[in-house]
Image (spheres, rainbow, N blue to C red):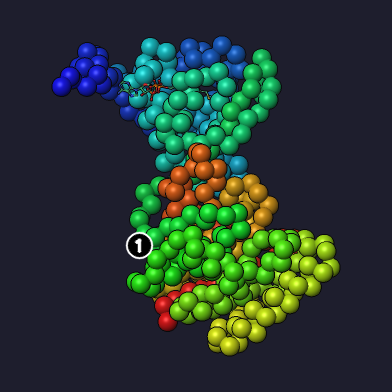
Amino acid sequence: MGVPSRLVSAVDTPSPPVFAVRPAGAADLDGLVAIETAAFETDRIARRSFRKLIEAPTAAVTVASLADGRLVGYALLLFRAGTGMARLYSIAVVPEQRGSGIGAALMAESERVAFARDRFLLRLEVREDNASGIRLYERLGYRRIGRYLDYYADHANALRYEKRLRGDAQSTAVRYYEQTTDFTCGPCCVMMALGHFRRDYAMGPVEEIKLWRQATTVFMMAGLGGCDPHGLAVSAARNGLSAGIHVSREGSLFLESVRDPEKRRVMELAQEDFRRQTVAFEIPITYRPLDVAAIRAALAGGALVIVLISAYRMFGKKVPHWVLVVGDDGRHLFVHDPWVEDREHETHSDAANLPIPYADFEHMARWGREPLRAAVVLRPR
Ligand SMILES: CC(C)(COP(=O)(O)OP(=O)(O)OC[C@H]1O[C@@H](n2cnc3c(N)ncnc32)[C@H](O)[C@@H]1OP(=O)(O)O)[C@@H](O)C(=O)NCCC(=O)NCCS
């Protein structure tokens, strides 16, 4: 057997430089300007901008330095107030030190800093012709979310990338299931709870459709394809769980976007039927939203909680969406999102056990103009 080529090249390569990463300080200005000059031909960040950014609470500049103190790279994050997002505005390593892991280390530290500041998404743009940048981001798990045409001063296009940050997310005992249709997010949350609370229960696509048929109010694919909280609670109870509904208002839900009066009427009747079934199954309904503190208390008591969110902050689509809250670390709620966005680029690990800062979760957990807030608390019976 031959020697693997990677081993050969590792032996042949001179030992990589020893470097450290740390936050930038005012004394790093000369070094930052030197890196910027060496790395970019145009659109350079000016010295006075670096000075401001080092001080700004809305930015984080991380530098990489060699053992002799010389700066060899930097990464710059921007934080926009009131969002769960951080943006990598710039990263650069001096040409003679590239290819030895400094770029990757700057990215790792930037992700850590962003997560520590309660950001759960890191976004960036990269020139379409920047092969080394694109390789770095894809290797680190960034997925492509779009393209801006004519983005740079020289008319080059930009590719947009995003990564969901996880910090040191603890693992959860709740098994994850990815929805296999566009409209079964709610039933998949019920299914994950069944998989967790019932030893004899096997998750799968047949169960997914069965639970959906038990919970949906949909009529000939009119309006939203999904499920209302009453239907989800009834399907959970029908399959052996104890369920409690928390909803911000009485009456029919999700009907605003259904134009056809006939379809509206059928959906209303289906919801009325579900509300009657909640009585038969003795499912309590509380007409008050479940806030983060109450969700945490339910989790601490061993429950799992299905929560209605606006998918807008999760993946930019204005649709109602159900996720399952499976954990809490004192600062984040951990969520299994049954929807794996863009099957080509996102994997289960992007959608399972997502840490979402409390304030962001509170913000996400609502849908529509009014807005509607709804949750179903599930426990073993
Ligand atoms: C993009 C950039 C920051 C990457 O920095 P870097 O320090 O070279 O990044 P890394 O060393 O972590 O990774 C680069 C390569 O080195 C390899 N590498 C990483 N650690 C290594 C090590 N210890 N030994 C050998 N190779 C290693 C990586 O596998 C990677 O290989 P690949 O590009 O062929 O896939 C750098 O190329 C740069 O400054 N470019 C100009 C500015 C720029 O384009 N910025 C991005 C704007 S969006």
Q: Residue at x 65, y 84 (%)?
A: 276
Ligand 1 appears in which quadrant?
top left
Q: Is residue 163 left or right of residue 285?
A: left
Q: Is residue 336 above or below residue 140?
A: below
In terms of depth relative to the viewer, which is nearer, 322 or 313? 322
In terms of depth relative to the viewer, which is nearer, 44 or 381? 381
Which amino acid is tagged 1?
Answer: Ala
**Which quadrant of the rendered structure holds the N terminus?**
top left
Question: Percent position (x, y) of residue 158?
Answer: 61, 25
Q: Residues within 10 Å of mark 1 (few under 14, many from 20)?
A: few
Question: Percent position (x, y) of residue 334?
Answer: 45, 58
Question: Percent position (x, y) of residue 69?
Answer: 33, 20
Q: Residue at x 52, y 19 (%)?
A: 130
Q: How many marks?
A: 1
Q: Residue at x 58, y 32 (%)?
A: 160
* Residue under numbered circle 1: 173
In terms of depth relative to the viewer, which is nearer, 224 or 41? 224
Would residue 335 be seen by someone viewing this image from the given angle? Answer: no
Q: Quadrant of residue 85?
A: top right
